[in-house]
Image (spheres, rainbow, N blue to C red):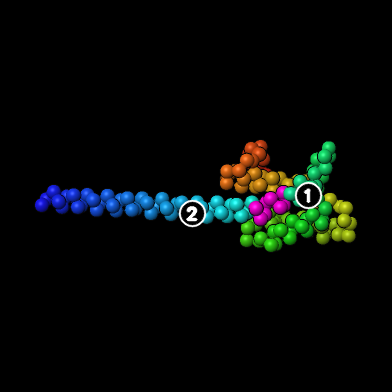
Amino acid sequence: MREVIIALLSSTITIVITSFFNYHYQLRQAIRNESVKYTTEILKMIYTPIYKILIAAIVPGDDYVGITKEMLFEIEDITNKNYELVDPHLNTIIWSLKKEVRREHYEESLKLFDKNMQLLTHVEHNFNFYRKRIGLPFDKTKVKKSYWIA
């Protein structure tokens, strides 16, 4: 009788411990899947389209010289459509560029903005950072580089 109780008790304890660890493993797996989903969405909806616009502003031989107000408005349109995915630092950069556009030469369409490359550096860093997080090829030099320019 005593052996039966010990066997039942050890089986019960084993089942409880296994269920506990399985629950926590499944919970962590669900959180990780959600994180990858949001990371992929941020990369796809925010940084890839903005990166394409900024790459178009790079002149071969002259490197990056800045963006026009039309490009800035395209970028702003992307961020407005997906506002919940935009990080605050990107939003701050865009707002400062919009203030610069409104303050200086609003009528001139050839005037270039972001000459200090703050937007480009931020977008390059985050584009590569999010690619790294989901396991896509990325530029290691862009992820290590500090992009917090004052």
Q: Is residue 10 left or right of residue 47?
A: left
Residue ID at (37%, 51%): 22
Q: Residues within 10 Å of mark 2 (few under 14, many from 20)?
A: few
Place of residue 50 in the rendered image (x, y in percent of width and height, measured from the top left): 72, 52
Residue 149 seen in this snapshot? no
> What's the CA distance linking mark 1 and mark 2?
37 Å
Q: Residues within 10 Å of mark 1 (few under 14, many from 20)?
A: some
Place of residue 109 in the rendered image (x, y in percent of width and height, measured from the top left): 87, 56
Task: Find residue 139 and report its image quarter.
Answer: top right
Q: Nearer the viewer, mark 1 or mark 2?
A: 2
Residue ID at (50%, 51%): 32
Q: Is residue 142 magenta?
A: no
**Callouts 1 and 2 close, C-beta under 8 Å:** no
| Region in magenta | 44-51
- Three-letter amino acid code at disc 1? Asp
- Three-letter amino acid code at disc 2? Ile
Secondary structure state at the residue bearing disc 2: helix
**Is the magenta region chiefly helix, strand or loop?**
helix
Place of residue 90 in the rendered image (x, y in percent of width and height, measured from the top left): 68, 53
Q: In this view of the protein, which residue sits in the foreground, 139 or 114? A: 139
Q: Is residue 115 left or right of residue 10?
A: right
Task: Please give the residue where the numbered disc 1 appears in the rendered image.
Answer: 114
Residue ID at (85%, 57%): 104
Task: Please give the residue where the numbered disc 2 appears in the rendered image.
Answer: 31
